[in-house]
Amino acid sequence: MLFFGGGVQSPRRRSKEKAILVTILIVYALYFLFFSKSSGDRESAVSVHNAVHGEGANRDSRSGQASPSHDNKRIEKDMVVASMKSDNTSWLFENFPDWHKSVYVVDDRNAELTVAQNKGRESMVYLTYIIDNYDHLPDVMLFIHSQRYQWHNDDPYYDGVPMLRRFQVPYLEKQGYVNVRCAWTLGCPAEIHPHTDTHRDDVHAGEYFKKGFIELFPGVDVPDEVGVSCCAQFGVTSWKVRERPKSDYVRFRKWLAETPLKDDLSGRIMEYSWHSWKGQQQDPSTGLPA
């Protein structure tokens, strides 16, 4: 509150003080209106940012990982990501705001999205997602790794951002299953020969693939050759997933959990089986998925 000295004042002085008072009141009014509006704009901007980047109710505040949508809005496109606590997945939120993200943290039992048993590398995440969401799957899903830069990304700089931006969703919707990697190395035209492969010192599923295939697909003939581009990153539609009953995926996960094979080998068998699970047959003339 402002006080002015008492006593007899001249008309000119009173007019001057009134002018000063009016000016101060105008300044206060403008200050209040401006900062009130700015605060509201900032809050609105934060709300929009959170909505676009999957923050707030749909993001795990502990780890910054995405969590399943808890509202009634149906998810149409989802990125299913296999990650570890040390991985930085912010690049997915920053570059793909139109995709929902389901980021599983396999080595954090307290994460909102995790797995009961960390085996088989990314395969345990993929199977867990399919089983848990089988009855309400999004239209299209991308099953990917968490790191932005990986040697097997189809990009001159191994950058996952341009690679995923080039991914053609309409083609996926038509085909049902699409490998994210187009390069033939590694995996094509025929990476595994189940009936003839022998032991190798490097990590290779060849000599173990036949037994794993028989256990995973009882009653199905083991193929002579298996060829598919590595490395367990692919897109799939809900209708393609549902060509198999949920019980099949439960059985696959049970095999993964119980197999005595080491993670690198069981994961490799899974890696070279996904296209078979999704109904893609191999072209006998090229050895590639038809």
Image: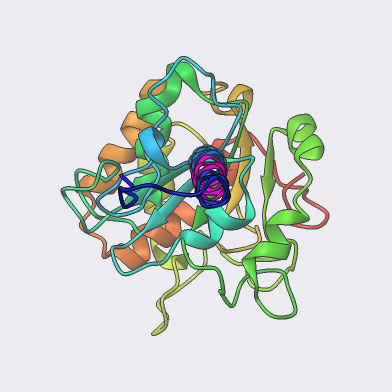
Residue at coordinates 54% horizontally, 19% vertically from top-left?
A: 74
- Nearer to me, 157 or 275: 157
- Nearer to me, 31 or 49: 31
Where is residue 131, by image quadrant? top left
Q: Position of residue 76 (x, y in %)?
A: 61, 27
Viewer can see residue 275: yes
Residue 278 counted in the magenta span: no
- 94 in relation to 204, above or below: above
Q: Is residue 96 left or right of residue 61?
A: right
Residue at coordinates 40% horizontally, 44% vertically from top-left?
A: 66
Mostly what secondary structure, the magenta segment? helix
Question: How many numbered markers are drawn?
Answer: 0
Viewer can see residue 42: no
Q: Is residue 68 left or right of residue 43?
A: left
- 9 in relation to 127, above or below: below
Quarter of the rendering occupied by the C terminus: top right
Q: Position of residue 27 (x, y in %)?
A: 54, 48
**Residue with the most extreme bottom position:** 201
Q: Position of residue 8 (x, y in %)?
A: 38, 47
**Part of the protein shown in magenta:** 19-31
- Nearer to me, 187 or 47: 47
Q: Position of residue 157 (x, y in %)?
A: 69, 80
Q: Is residue 252 left or right of residue 224?
A: left
